[in-house]
Amino acid sequence: MIKCEEQRVEENNWVIELLHDRGTHNHTLIVYPEGHRGVSGLSQGAKEVVREMNDAQAKPKNILVAIKNKFPDEHPNMRHIYNIKEKMRREGSEGRNVAEQMLHLAREHDYINWVSCSDRTSKVINRAFLAHPAMVEVLRTYPLVIGMDSTYKTNRYEFPVLEIVGVTPTNQNFLIAYEFMKDETAASYRWVLQKLKLLLGEGVIPSAILTDKEGGLMRPVAEVFPNSRHLLCTWHINNDVEARVSFLCNKNKDVDRAFKNGVWKRIMEATTVEEYDRAVASMEDRYVRWQRVIDYMNNTWLTDHRHKFVLAWTNEVLHFGNITTCRVESQHSVVKSWLGSSQGSLDTVFRKVHASIINQVTEIKNGLESSRRRHGALFKSYLYQHLVGHVSHHALELILEEHTRMRQLSTEVFERCGCAKLSTHGLPCACNIYMAVQGGVGLYLDLVHRFWRTLEIGDGADIPEFVEESAQVVELFRSLVDDVLARDIAVVRDISRIVHDELHPENAGFEEPEPNLTRRGRPRKQRNSTTRNLSFVEHVRNMGPRRSCDQGSSSMSTQQTRSSLGSYMSIDLIPPGFKEWLPQFMLQYIRGYCDVIPDGNCGFRCAAEFFLGDQERYGEIRSTLVGEIGKLEQYRHIYRPDSIANVSWRINWRGGRCGEEHWMITECDLWPLATHFNAVVVILSIGNRGGLFPNFTILPLENRYESTRPTK
């Protein structure tokens, strides 16, 4: 601002007169123009660079460097870049909300997409299925092996994103589709799998579907794809076994290591049912003193799921070498490298995933063309003369490995081959290669599965199932159109509206979900981070040895001591379906949890884990309660109509696994427990809203230690 000496009016105009010796600034002069938006604004050329780089999903910091290099006379800062990006986003949305903009972009790029809401009256999206048209074409060329897994910390709504991934003959991933899901219930997974089946068509059956042992996913896979083999990821299984065995064995590294690298490895790699039975019998014999480990293995993996990961059964499945979901984990990493933040909205995530898919399509086509045109020196022998240029390089490398194995088997090739490569990969096994070598004629294309020979996507590929079914679907739709047009105009109008909403969901008024702002404990330091949380096995690896506390009969300090958090699992590891049942206000106060062994002693195990530091001391808790119920007259009223003798018989059990007659009766047995340990016990009747007993709190019946309040 400039200080004026005077101002006066001449006729109808203002006139300001400034004396040269009186003009002064009332602020300091600019030193760094980068800090002044008016001085450091971007030129039109710089704005175009920002637009182009933003469309290429470049990060703001990289855009800023490019602007400074190309326009050295300009002085932008990061705020200029963000402002221009926001302005472009508003201009591109043309007044549409976030959900409508995502669906508009999906239609603009010809995506196959479906959305659903929580109920008929709501327009808030709780599920969205998105598939790029190029990837759908790749899927219909290579539909036999499909993997799927959820990733987290990708969007501001904290929705899990399920990624469905396929594999090409060049051993490259392709993102079939991805889905935003509000939850991971069986209903959500079933909805997604039904949409995936629509992409595939009724006549196409994947030979293998790979997942981890996600509770909500197991049943829907069997229901929607009953004729496909469901395989479980061996990598996730090994991690879970390592963590659970280590935890159950009190972090005994020797037992953990011997189990994982010994009997468990033999169980998983058993190639016949007889070999599998021997390996299981060996486990039960060698680890008889670790009954909890045997129970865990049988109940969790072997009884119901052995055919989904043991070689004796999976060697019968055409999976092309895919027995883990590591391929899907790799896709998670690729997508997150493009996202860069866990706070993206629906339309932002869509744009960035779309850019990653464009790159992926380019890489897939490059790999396929390379297999058609380039021929390595390793494959110039007569053995591969009929295959080179007609099968993928990856298939040739697998055949080369089997050729090496054939030499190692020597004269026992027919006895020891097993022909697993033929059944699992659709490639010549050691037997086939041996006969080709002996005959001096090389390997022919008819020994190689069509998957490895399909080096063109779409029209060039031999996929008659889709051609036949497509013609049938078109004919059915035409007959339906004729049927609708023959109806009353009201019916035509109603069906037209339904079809229009399906074809143009961007105009249906859908809304984005509300961000999940619930937080436990202190605020996150890196709210924008896409880095995943530690897995169960990583938490166990980071935990120290479990510690326990000895209880004295009269020592108040010992009774007040609870086990350290090292005996518990992190609150982050509470299963998702269970966590939602807990009162949300309590989550920030929960230090950890322990999932005790379900052998009928579970209630007493919980008490032993908390008060004594070791659930295996549940027998001491039983003895303590038997002694306690004889001390106070009030217990006779609590256990009525049972006599104290009958109660003592029920509680005083030392025989290991027990039946219902020796279970804990919480509404009765927790009174002596709370009184003896001077503790407050809270019972949450979660998951059983129609139960007899609601949530309630039990206080000690008397204070024996002259405390003014409970100590636990």
Image: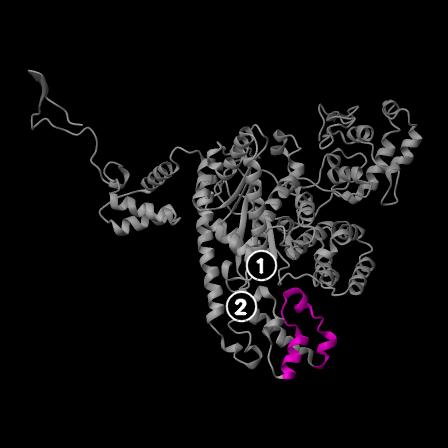
Q: Residue at x 75, y 29 (%)?
A: 678
Q: Nearer the viewer, residue 192 or 45?
A: 192
In the image, 629: left or right of 1?
right
Q: What stretch of residues is rendered in magenta?
A: 411-439
Residue 116: x %, y % from top left: 56, 36
Mark earlier in primary sequence (1, 2):
2
Q: Nearer the viewer, residue 254 or 497?
A: 497
Q: Quadrant of residue 189?
A: top right
Q: Number of marks in the image?
A: 2
Residue 535 visible: yes
Label 1, secondary structure: give it: helix
Q: Nearer the viewer, residue 237 or 56?
A: 56
Q: Nearer the viewer, residue 557 or 515?
A: 515
- Observer-side mark, 1 or 2, equals 1
| Residue that carries the numbered disc 2 in the rendered image | 392
Q: Residue at x 48, y 46 (%)?
A: 111
What residue type is disc 1 on?
Pro
